[in-house]
């Protein structure tokens, strides 16, 4: 009878672990898929003439204005000094990570990235929020220093970093930066 | 109309009923390990496997898994301590508590490891040492509660270590042990808010909350509600206290519908006698007679201060109870024949067991053991039952032998009596043993030496 209990435990446990593994794999496979530049943009970088949205404030203020939409706003004054990049604030696409969506807005002024503001950061749980708050200022500074989305991930914040830089790249693409 | 007294159980094929019980027991074991595997699977299902990328992530992931499995063990421990009738009927109260105990230390180590690994892992990510990481972690919502829960858990396990427990009274230890409910409960918020595995809207979260509801529901139902309801329903009071030998008292109880208590002969209840001096002690005591519709009887030997006082409770004392519990009954039978050995006050459940059992003449053999003629409690009643049911009785009176098998008197040892000579058909018998631990261990040793498998040995140790 003990043999039966041992074998039963072994098979049941293995089956459960494999199921968990498989579910986890599908989660992982679906993540990179949604991380490709979101296709739900309303047209390509429509140059709105509206005022620059209030995300000019530095730091990682979690702007509540745009929510999940990934439209783009930019101010019309064009100062083409960087391959056609116009001044203004561009909101990147919302990138889904396993820990919640990440979306950033980039401000271009005089052909330079002058600010990156987080519209939304990973917030699935308390630890994610902590990681976001820790990683976002570092990423922002690196982006400002390197003037590109081509910066290394912050260790311990891989998902946040990936989402952040992906969203940033889409914003820069809109800006033609 | 139903018979007013407890009817004997229907004749059953013991081998078949054991096969069913063994299957249930194996399923319970499988369930235990499956729940531990499920805890790991929760982590995997949330994409955890992909996080084994950097040293910090690996440490963090292991910490999360340790927390999930450790908490799962704690919840299983609650379920085992809940005295759920299905579990009691399957493996018995003793085994359930033994498994409960064996999980205690692993659960504590896993949860301490959970804290240490996560502080290290998060510390590595942030580039600070684990001690410094306590600050940021403490600042997260629900984390102070979780730290507090860990402290309580350490207190609970430390007071349960054998060496420490001896310094506590049962009541003191039990009070600290109740804190484990608090410890497990206050750990839940941080699992749901800080931990990513159980995020909102996931099946993992539903499963985990379900586990908590199951464990706490079982405790609330079977440790609190059911005993209170049953005590109120049966309204048991003391109707007589009779000293049957020096230091041994039979307490007669009356109540309503006692044949519907669900008790089998050989089982015990945990009794509480509501007088000013005795209400804070509860006593596990076996029935010494099968309950009738209006009466039941327990027989107790004065050992601790607590049992001494209950032999002096006045007639009319109200009694509350939890039970019936235990597998020292006909439900544990596995083999066609019955062999019983009882020593001292261990006779009480045997008396009820024999009275309740439906036995073919010659099916059962009973060995009664006492150190002195004064300690032959209830033997006259056993003789009556034996005569009525065709049970073979052996008696052994006298102090233990210095040489030979230590569980029998010197005279019998000299005559060459052995377990095999008392129970010639032992291999086809269930051996029920009840008595002091030291004596019982010796008999059990002999039985195993004769090749009797574990499932045919049913032991109830009387240390209280």
Image (tube, rainbow, N blue to C red):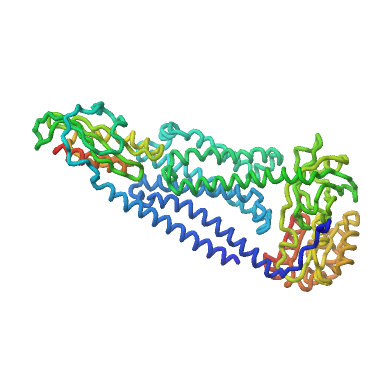
Visible residue check, residue B343: no
Q: Is residue B13 above or below residue B194?
A: below
Question: For this view, does A1 lie left or right of residue B424?
Answer: left
Q: Residue at 81% of width from left, 68% of height from top?
A: B359
Going by the image, does A48 lie left or right of A157? left
Q: Is residue A23 above or below residue B109?
A: below
Q: Is residue A96 left or right of residue B199?
A: left
At x 80% / y 35%, what residue is drawn? B277
Q: Nearer the viewer, residue B126 or B205?
A: B205
Left or right, B106 with reference to B401: left
Choose between B464 and A120: the one closer to the eye.
A120
The answer to whether A46 is drawn above or below residue B85 in the figure is above
Q: Name the quadrant of the C terminus of chain A.
A: top left
Q: Residue furthest front?
A: B1
Q: Is residue B266 visible?
A: yes
Q: Nearer the viewer, residue B390 or A176?
A: A176
Seen in the picture, residue A48 relative to B337 is either above or below; the reply is above
* Residue A172 in the image, given as x and y percentages of width and height: 18, 38
Residue drawn at point x = 77 percent, y = 71 percent: B420
The picture places residue A112, in percent across and down from the top left corner, at 15, 32
Quarter in which the N terminus of chain A is drawn: bottom right
Q: Position of residue B422 (x, y in %)?
A: 81, 69
**Looking at the picture, how far across and down is residue A106, in whole percent?**
21, 34
Q: In this figure, what is the number of numbered marks?
A: 0
């Amino acid at each position: 009878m003990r043999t039966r209990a041992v074998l039963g435990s072994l098979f049941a446990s293995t089956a459960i672990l494999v199921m968990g593994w498989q579910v986890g794999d599908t989660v992982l496979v679906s993540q990179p898929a949604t991380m490709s530049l979101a296709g739900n943009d309303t047209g390509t970088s429509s140059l709105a003439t509206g005022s620059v949205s209030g995300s000019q404030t530095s730091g990682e203020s979690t702007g509540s204005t745009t929510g999940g939409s990934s439209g783009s706003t930019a101010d019309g004054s064009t100062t083409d000094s960087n391959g056609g990049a116009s001044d203004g604030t561009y909101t990147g696409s919302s990138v889904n990570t396993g820990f919640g969506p990440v979306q950033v807005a980039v401000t271009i002024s005089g052909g330079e990235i002058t600010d990156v503001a987080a519209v939304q950061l990973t917030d699935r749980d308390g630890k994610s929020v902590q990681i976001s708050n820790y990683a976002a200022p570092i990423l922002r500074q690196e982006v400002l220093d390197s003037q590109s989305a081509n910066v290394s991930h912050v260790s311990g914040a891989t998902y946040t970093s990936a989402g952040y830089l992906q969203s940033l790249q889409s914003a820069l693409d809109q800006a033609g930066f | 109309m139903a018979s007013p007294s407890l009817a004997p159980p229907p004749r059953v094929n013991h081998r078949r009923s054991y096969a069913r019980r063994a299957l249930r027991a194996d399923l319970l074991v499988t369930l235990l390990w499956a729940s531990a595997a499920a805890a790991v699977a929760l982590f995997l299902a949330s994409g955890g496997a992909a996080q084994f990328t950097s040293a910090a992530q690996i440490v963090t992931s292991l910490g999360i898994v340790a927390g999930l499995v450790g908490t799962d063990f704690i919840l299983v421990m609650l379920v085992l301590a809940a005295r759920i009738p299905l579990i009691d009927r399957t493996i018995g109260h003793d085994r359930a508590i033994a498994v409960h105990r064996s999980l205690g230390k692993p659960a504590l180590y896993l949860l301490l490891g959970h804290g240490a690994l996560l502080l290290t892992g998060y510390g590595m990510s942030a580039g600070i040492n684990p001690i410094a990481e306590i600050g940021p972690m403490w600042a997260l919502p629900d984390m102070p509660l979780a730290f507090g829960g860990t402290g309580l858990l350490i207190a609970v396990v430390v007071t349960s270590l054998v060496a420490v427990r001896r310094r506590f009274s049962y009541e003191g230890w039990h009070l600290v042990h109740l804190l484990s409910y608090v410890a497990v409960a206050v750990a839940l918020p941080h699992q749901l808010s800080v931990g990513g595995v159980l995020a909102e809207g996931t099946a993992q979260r539903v499963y985990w909350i379900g586990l908590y509801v199951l464990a706490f529901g079982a405790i609330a139902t079977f440790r609190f509600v059911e005993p209170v309801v049953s005590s109120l329903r049966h309204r048991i009071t003391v109707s007589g206290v009779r000293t049957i030998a020096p230091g041994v008292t039979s307490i007669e109880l009356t109540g309503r519908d006692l044949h519907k208590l669900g008790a089998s002969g050989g089982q015990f209840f945990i009794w509480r006698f509501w007088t000013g001096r005795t209400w804070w002690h509860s006593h596990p005591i076996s029935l010494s007679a099968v309950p009738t519709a209006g009466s039941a009887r327990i027989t107790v030997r004065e050992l601790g201060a607590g049992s001494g006082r209950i032999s002096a409770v006045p007639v009319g004392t109200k009694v509350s109870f939890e039970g019936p519990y235990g597998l020292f009954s006909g439900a544990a039978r596995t083999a066609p024949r019955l062999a019983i050995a009882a020593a001292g006050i261990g006779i009480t459940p045997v008396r009820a067991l024999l009275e309740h059992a439906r036995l073919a003449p010659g099916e059962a053999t009973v060995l009664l053991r006492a150190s002195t003629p004064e300690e032959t409690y209830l033997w006259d009643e056993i003789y009556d039952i034996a005569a009525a049911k065709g049970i073979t009785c052996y008696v052994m009176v006298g102090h233990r032998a210095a040489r030979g098998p230590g569980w029998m008197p010197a005279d019998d040892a000299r005559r060459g009596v052995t377990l095999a000579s008392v129970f010639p058909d032992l291999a086809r018998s269930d051996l029920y043993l009840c008595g002091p631990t030291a004596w019982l261990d010796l008999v059990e040793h002999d039985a195993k030496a004769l090749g009797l498998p574990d499932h045919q040995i049913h032991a109830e140790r009387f240390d209280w």
